[in-house]
Image (cartoon, rainbow, N blue to C red):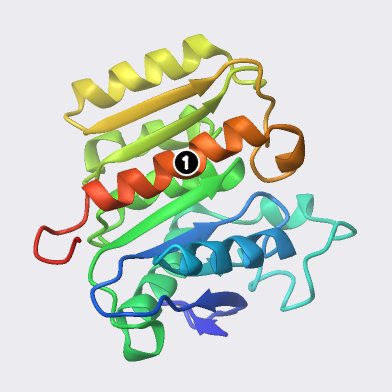
Amino acid sequence: MLTSADGTSLSAYGARALGPGRPGIVILPDVRGLHHFYEELALRFAEAGVAAVAIDYFGRTAGHEPRDDSFEFRPHVERTTPEQIAEDTGAAVAWLRSPDGGGVHDVFTVGFCFGGSNSWNQAAFGHRLSGCIGFYGQPQRTEPFLAQLRAPLLLLIAGADFTPAEAYSRFAEELREAGVELEQHTYPGAPHSFFDRTFTEHQEACADAWSRMLDFIARHQSPEKSG
């Protein structure tokens, strides 16, 4: 359990990485909140040497009930705000930097769908992040924060997503014009949620995305902490 800046108690799942000087990552789930997939992903990051904590968005409206596939998420998603999500992310960042989380120095975020754009947004909220990764986020959710973004972004795009390719191209240009460091990669033919919901059906794309995430994290660590 973590406590957000406004006093909200939120569920989270943390996994520490062994050894000093490890980076850390906050996982921002899709609309399901703290689904079991994201708990497993936190463990996978920790096994790869990246301390991880996955958070739930709905402590203010749904308490701490389990987030399985029967969870009626839509009413709760509609009641979130970017500022509340940033406060919850801040609690997770603080946990990673605390002794309980391993005393992490370099912290990243990664998000999926609803969490994809929310992950990019965290670069605007003063968390002192080393980078923000988003899968198939919606550019219009991040565009209001362009001028405040202060961390490198990685955009992992599903080629068959319902968001058109032109929207991502325009978004990338807007980011560059705002002076934001970014990388992007599109997976032709991959559907929305290819990594988190249909992982076994798109193993090649998922393996590539996993490698790109770890490489992005390694390249954006502080020089004295990396390696």
- 177 lies above or below 204: above
Quadrant in which residue 149 is drawn: top left
Residue 105: % across, % down: 23, 71
Q: Residue furthest right?
A: 70
Residue 165: % across, % down: 52, 13
Is 93 placed left or right of 6 in the picture?
Answer: left
Mark 1, other Cα within 10 Å: few <14 / some 14–19 / many ≥20: many
Quadrant in which residue 158 is drawn: top right
Mark 1: which secondary structure? strand
Residue 113: % across, % down: 61, 40
Quadrant in which residue 67 is drawn: bottom right
Q: Residue furthest bottom?
A: 99
Residue drawn 64% across the image and 73% down it? 59
Residue 126: % across, % down: 25, 59
Residue drawn 23% across the image and 23% down it? 176
Name the foreground residue: 65 vs 224. 224
Residue drawn 39% across the image and 14% down it? 170
Quadrant containing the N terminus in the rendered view: bottom right
Identity of the amino acid at label 1? Gly
Quadrant containing the C terminus in the rendered view: bottom left
Is 190 placed left or right of 149 in the picture?
Answer: right
Is 17 placed left or right of 157 in the picture?
Answer: left
- 40 lies above or below 138: below
Is 44 placed left or right of 162 in the picture?
Answer: left
Residue drawn 52% across the image and 49% down it? 111
Number of dots carrying numbers = 1
- 180 lies above or below 91: above
- 49 lies above or below 166: below
Q: Residue furthest top?
A: 166
**Residue under circle 1?**
134
